[in-house]
Amino acid sequence: MKLSIIVAITDDFAIGKDNDLLLKIPGDLQHFKKVTQGHTVVMGDRTLISLPGSKPLPNRRNIVMTLDKDFKAEGCEIAYSIDEMKELVKDEDEVFIIGGGTIYKLFYPIVDKLYLTIAHTSVEADTYFPTINFEEWEETSREDITAGEKAEFAYSFVNYVRK
């Protein structure tokens, strides 16, 4: 089983503010859907609550990580530890960690692949992705989008695998 993180970050690793996404990046939601559809996604309870209607993502198996033993979420499985989550997904080919900040910090040291949308800008944030040491990762694909009609800033879709 391969563990992967998918996340949109700024150049300074910002990912959120007030339990919401920082930026509206053209094509990012479609990219996220294309990459994760048909797979298992793992998120924290606050990330689930931030989704439209606080509902699980369609066409994906949704696992919520929480420390709250009373937390319930219709259409989601609940895990209280990394080991418990790994047991739930042991037969999967690839599992996507989708946030938020605490969950990214928890899983970053053990993931095999990063799917990054990097917004080449800086904005005010209160939540950051762990600093990436790019010496530990090999870039496997990149698509650069320039600023213009569709985006006020340049951004890139970049995939990495751990060396």
Image: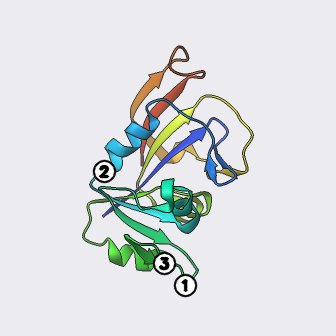
Q: Foreground: 84 or 138?
A: 84
**Residue 84 vertical position relative to residue 62 in the rendered view, above or below:** below
**Residue 104 vertical position relative to residue 28 in the rendered view, above or below:** below
* Amino acid identity at mark 2: Gln
Q: Residue at x 38, y 73 (%)?
A: 86
Give the side of residue 8 with respect to residue 34, left or right: right
Which of the numbered marks, if any, corresponds to residue 37?
A: 2
Residue 78 visible: yes
Residue carrying label 1 = 70
Instruction: Give coordinates of residue 38: x percent, y percent.
Output: 26, 54
Q: Residues within 10 Å of mark 3 (few under 14, many from 20)?
A: few
Q: Residue at x 44, y 61 (%)?
A: 55
Instruction: Give coordinates of residue 36: x percent, y percent.
Output: 34, 50
Q: Residues within 10 Å of mark 2 (few under 14, many from 20)?
A: some
Q: Pick the quarter of the image with the N terminus.
A: bottom left
* Amino acid identity at mark 1: Asp
Residue 163 visible: no
Q: Residue at x 52, y 14 (%)?
A: 149
**Residue 16 vertical position relative to residue 61 in the rendered view, above or below:** above
* Secondary structure at numbered mark 1: loop
Q: Residue at x 55, y 17 (%)?
A: 147
Instruction: Give coordinates of residue 69: x percent, y percent.
Output: 54, 85
Residue carrying label 3 = 72
* Secondary structure at numbered mark 3: loop
**Residue 47 vertical position relative to residue 155 in the rendered view, above or below:** below
* Amino acid identity at mark 3: Lys
- Residue 97 lies in what quarter of the image? bottom left
